[in-house]
Amino acid sequence: MKQTWENVDEYITDRLCSNEQIMDEVLVANRKADLPEIDVSPNQGKFLQLLVQMKGAKRILEIGTLGAYSTIWMARGLPSDGRIITLELDGYHAQVAQSNIAHAGLEHMIEVRRGDALDHLAKMEAEQEGAFDLIFIDADKPNNPKYLTWALYFSHPGTVIIGDNVVRDGEIVNKHSTDPRIQGVRTFYDILADNPRITSTAIQTVGSKGYDGFMIGIVQE
């Protein structure tokens, strides 16, 4: 089945995401830099772009940059005065991301902040950074509960919060898992279920990235 999933992803990308030369070049740059091949797929990237446009977002927070592939997809959905703050722990990854952002001509729109995301989020609170219209969480899964708590803090009514990799080959149903990534995602779900400030759902996905899924929620009044 995985080959079928990959073939379908290739078909969708060819039919609906084929005129994206810059995005192809970003992926090539990430491979040449030996970054982990964990970027969102092209059709998932365009899905993020469409969500940005449907939301009419102007301010985006991304937790987890890697080589800025998803970052650039989202930025291309912003208006000319839009802005993204993206947080990346690894200095080398951030360097590659900055190069890709420059290549895409989006330096004026995207700010990469290097270092521990939780430290940056606390600093942003102290600096009174303000709320974001859309927040994309795609970093280390054990810290997903903390990232979600911060995401809710940096939200206003109507903020869209998206969490990637929330199915993990179906392992999220295994409450006895000793994998801290699984337990982090399970606690993430617990917060979503119990916090009245957000209404959300999760969608299972298959494709070139295997069997996984994403969460999408909207912050309430």
Image (spheres, rainbow, N blue to C red):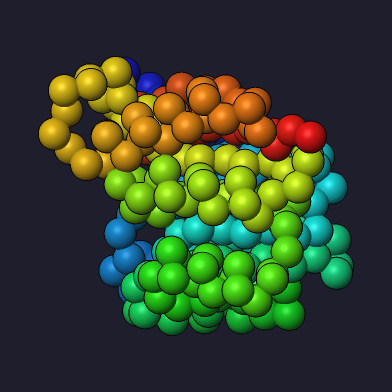
Total labels: the figure holds: 0
Residue 207 falls in which quadrant of the image?
top left
Q: Position of residue 137 (x, y in %)?
A: 50, 49
From the viewer's perspective, is 145 left or right of 151? left
Q: Is residue 38 above or below residue 185?
A: below
Q: Residue at x 58, y 40 (%)?
A: 162
Q: Position of residue 166 (x, y in %)?
A: 41, 33
Pick the residue in front: 212 or 42.
212
Pick the residue in front: 143 or 78.
143
From the viewer's perspective, is 80 left or right of 152? right
The answer to whether residue 209 of the structure is visible from this angle is yes
Q: Residue at x 73, y 64 (%)?
A: 130
In the picture, which quadrant includes the N terminus? top left
Q: Is residue 130 above or below residue 160?
A: below
From the viewer's perspective, is 113 left or right of 31? right
Q: Position of residue 43 (x, y in %)?
A: 57, 40
From the viewer's perspective, is 216 left or right of 173? right
Q: Is residue 208 above or below residue 46?
A: above
In the picture, which quadrant includes the C terminus? top right
Q: Residue at x 86, y 68 (%)?
A: 80
Q: Is residue 39 above or below residue 98?
A: above
Pick the residue in front: 44 or 61.
61
Q: Residue at x 73, y 80 (%)?
A: 108
Q: Position of residue 9 (x, y in %)?
A: 49, 33
The answer to whether residue 25 of the structure is visible from this angle is no
